[in-house]
Image (cartoon, grey):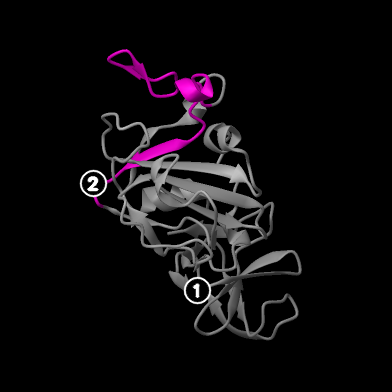
Amino acid sequence: MNPIDILIKNNFKMTSNPHTMTPFGFRNYTVNRFNYDAYCGGFHRAYDFAKHDGAAIPAVMSGVVVQGTSNYGNFGGTVVIANKALGYQVIYGHLKRNLIVTIGQHVKYGETIGYQGDTNNLNVPMASHLHIQFQRYGYLKEKDFVCNGISAYDIDLRKDRYFNGIFIPKYNMNIRGTPSLNGKIISSAKPKDNLAFNSVTYKDGHYWLKLNIGYVSSGTQQNIYGHFK
């Protein structure tokens, strides 16, 4: 599962997709002769989503709230969460200005980090929506911070130890007492079972989901043994 899947699962509708643009993110969006993408040379290397004004925004990966987070940031109410272990950082923009996270705070996957709004640093009319932008981990100078973005579809959230949810296997699966191929088999799961898990461990080339009664493999980096709900 990738971060885009998470937002769709939470009933957010994508309203701007950089993958539909050529080259990636070249949107050049202009309304009433105002170009919203002029600062980045016409590029908008981010995704826009909308649910409703004031909708709670979930963290699509865990991490630490870092510089760039501000009630009056580059994208209006802006939150930046970085995960050094994963090698990514995420910008959440146009949030309501009453931010509920602070720099240095550790945030887990799924926690609310802000609320959908229409804030921006240009004071121009804007429909309420979430601007979400993915970057490689690390400090960027202002223009690179605003303009650089990568695909979210390549991010495997199983690499986030705090990833949680429901896994539905497509095979008969062993449930083991420890997250290892050598772990003692203590139970089993059937195809289409709904397996609730609360964290992920990588060992023996597998991503192990921690269940209430043990661990089940969700697959390897190349193969997933089911799907996430």
Amino acid type, residue under disc 2 in the picture: His
Q: Which residues are magenta?
A: 25-54
Q: Check the image and name the residue furthest to the top.
A: 33
* Quarter of the view holding residue 31: top left
Q: Position of residue 35 (x, y in %)?
A: 38, 19
Residue at label 1?
198
Query: Does residue 154 appear anywhere in the picture?
Result: no
Work out whether residue 80 or residue 129 is closer to the camera in this orientation and state it: 80
Q: Residue at x 32, y 51 (%)?
A: 97
Horizontal arrangement in the rendering, residue 107 relative to residue 224 (left or right): left
Q: Is 128 rendered above or below residue 138?
A: above
Count neighbours of disc 1 (C-alpha within 10 A) and say few if under 14, some if 14 to 19, many if 20 or more. some
Is residue 204 part of the magenta span, yes or no? no
* Drawn side of residue 47 relative to residue 120, left or right: right
Q: Is residue 184 above or below residue 142?
A: below
Task: Choose top left, top right, bottom left or bottom right for residue 208.
Answer: bottom right
SS state under label 2:
loop
Q: Where 72 falls versus 99 (above or below)?
A: above
Residue nearest the viewer, comparing 21 with 81: 81
Instruction: Quickly name the residue at label 2.
Output: 52
Which quadrant: the C terminus? bottom left
Query: Which is nearer the N-term, disc 1 or disc 2?
Result: 2
